[in-house]
Amino acid sequence: MEKVVEIIDISMNYHTLDGETKAIQKLNLDVSNGEFVSIVGPSGCGKSTLLSIVSGILKPSVGKVMVNGKEVQGPSTSVGYMLQKDHLFEWRTIIKNITIGLEIQGKLNKETQGSIEKLLIEYGLYEFRNHYPRQLSGGMRQRAALIRTLATKPDILLLDEPFSALDYQTRIAISEEVWLILKKEKKTAILVTHDLAEAISMSDRIIVLTKRPAEIKSIHEIKLTCNNKTPITCREAPEFRFYFNTIWKELDIHV
Amino acid sequence: MYDSENVIVSQEHKRYLMGHKRKNSAISFSRFIILIFIFALWEIAAYKEWIDPFIMSQPSRIIKTMASMSKDGSILMHTGVTVYETIIGFVSGTVLGTMIAIALWWSDFLAKVLDPYLVVLNALPKTALGPIILVWIGGTTKSIIVMALLLSIVVTIINVFTGFSNCDEDKIKLLKTFGANKRQILRKVVFPAGIPTIISTLKINVGLSLVGVIVGEFLVSKSGLGHLIIYGGQVFKMDLVMTSVLILAIVAAILYLSVLWIEKKVLKMM
Ligand SMILES: Nc1ncnc2c1ncn2[C@@H]1O[C@H](COP(=O)(O)OP(=O)(O)O)[C@@H](O)[C@H]1O
Ligand SMILES: [Mg+2]
C-alpha cells in the first residue's frame, strides 16, 4: 500500500535553561493510506512531541517527515490534529467553533459551509449548531471537536489522547463513533493513547515506544477475529487478551 | 444537559426558596436600618450639641445645602464634571492600557525589557506626579483626565498582559495546527479569552480613576466634587464638604454598579 506518512530518522531535543531534554531519538516509521496506527509508551516519552512534528508545528532537530510524498515544512491542510481536551471556544457557537479552521485558512465559503452542514447532519449535531459548547455533553463536545478537525478536509488525522478527559463509558462509546467516522471518511489515523485496550480495539498496528528519548521498542500487527469489525466487537475477540498481555509486559510499567 | 424549565416545583423546594428569600430580605432590611440609625444618631447628636454641628455638619443641614445647590443647578454641574472626567479617564486608561498589553504580548523582548519599569511605575503612588502634570499641562480638565488615566493605565497593562499570557497554550496550539499566524492567534483566541480579564480590570479602574479625578480637582480646583471639597474645607463650610462627599459616595457606587452590569451583559453574550 501507498505510504502517506514517512517519518525519517527523526530526533528531537528541547533546550531550556535547565538543560537539554532528548525527547526523540532516531525514529523511523511509515504509515500507509487508510491505516489506523496507535502509539503507546510511558508518559513523558515524547509521543505528543512526535505528533507535533508530524503536524508541522514543531521542527525536529534532525530528520524529516514526508506527508503524501512532500516534506513537511509547516502546518498543512492535509494533516488534522485532535488534542486531549476538545478546546471548543466558549464564546463561539458550535458551528462557529467548527468553522474556525476554515476561517483561518480563508476558505470559508458557500461550498465548504455546505459540506460542514452535511457533516453536522450526518453526525447528529445539526440541531445544536447554534448552541454554545457548555450546553453540550462531554461526548458531543468531542464529536464537535472531531468535525472541527474534519472540516478542513485533512487526509491524515493525528489524535493525541483525545478521549482521556472523558469518563469510561463515554470514552468507549465515542471511540467507537470516531473510529466509524474515520473509516467512513477513509482517513489515515495516528492515535496516541495510554489506554491499551483502546489501542488494541481500534488499531491495525500498535507502535510501542521506549522511555525518553523515544525509540521504537516494538511493532504489533493487530489481527483480531471478529465479524463486523468495530472497536466494541473487537474487544470480544479471542486474541484480545493475548495482545493485551504481550504489550503490557513490553510497556514495563512499575508502580 | 438542559435546564428543565417547566418542571413542577416540589413543596420542599418551594420551602427552600421561601427561606432563601426571607433571609435575603432580612439582610436588605438590616442594611437599611444601619443607614437610618447612623443618620438619625448624627442628627440627634448635632441637635443636642453632643457634637459641634459647625465642624461635624448635620444631615438636616446637608439636605438644606443640597436643596439650595439643586436650585441654582451647581450640584448637577459639579457632579457632571466629576463623572465626565472619571469616565473619560477610565475608558481611555483601559483602552490604552489594553493596547500596550497587546504590544507586550506581541513582542516577548519588549515585555522583558519593560518589565522593571512597569514594576516601579506600579509601585509608585501616581498622585505624587500631580504637581508635575499640573505644571506641564496646565490647570485644565486635561490635567485631571491625565491624572485619572495615569492611575488606571499601569494596572491595566499589568493585569491584561498577565491575562493574555495565561491563555491556554493548547488552544493556541490548536489554531497553529490550522496554520494560524500571530495576528490570527491574537484575534481568534488570545483577545477573546482575555475579555473577562479586561472587564474585571475595568472594575478596578473605576475606583482608581475616581481617585485620580478627585486629586486632580484638588489641584486644579475649578469645578467638580473634588473642587467643592477642597474649597469647602478652606472656607470652613463643612456642610458643603459633607454634601460633596456624600454625593461622591453615591457617584462611586453608581459607576461601579454600571460596570458590574456591563460585565454581566458582556459575559452573557460570550
Ligand atoms: N516545550 C518544551 N520544552 C522543553 N521540554 C519539553 C517541551 N515539551 C515537552 N518537553 C519534554 O519532552 C518530553 C516529552 O514530552 P511529550 O512529548 O509531551 O511526552 P508524552 O506526550 O509522551 O507524554 C518530556 O520530558 C517533556 O518534559
Ligand atoms: Mg502527551
Image: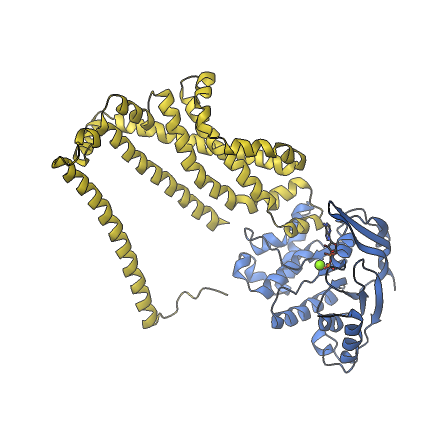
Q: What is the number of callouts on the image?
A: 0
Q: Is residue B80 left or right of residue B71?
A: right
Residue at the (34%, 40%) spot, across then down:
B253
Depth check: give the residue in front, B108 or A99: B108
Q: How is the image coloured?
A: by chain
Quadrant showing the C terminus of chain A: bottom right
Q: Which chain is in yellow here?
A: B
Identified at 43% across, 35% down, the residue is B208
- Quarter of the image containing the N terminus of chain A? bottom right
Ligand 2 visible in quadrant: bottom right
At which x and y percent is residue A95?
Answer: 59, 55
Q: B36 or A238, which lies in front?
A: B36
Evaluate whether residue A35 shows in this view.
no
To which quarter of the image does residue B85 belong?
top left
Left or right: residue B256 versus residue A150 is: left
Whether B18 is drawn above or below B237: the answer is: below
Locate residue A38 relative to residue A87 in the image: left or right: right
In the picture as drawn, the residue positioned furthest to the left comes out as: B48
Q: Identify the residue at the far front of this view.
A: B50
Residue B243: where, in percent of width, then height? 25, 32
Q: Nearer the viewer, residue A238 or A93?
A: A238
> Is A131 above or below relative to B257?
below
- Note whether residue A85 is visible: yes
Residue drawn 44% across and 45% down?
Answer: B263
Residue drawn where x is 83% and y is 48% of the image: A61
| Residue B228 x/y as whole percent | 29, 25
The spot of residue B105 in percent (x, y) is 62, 38
Q: Left or right of B208: which side holds B68?
A: left
Q: Colour of chain A?
A: blue
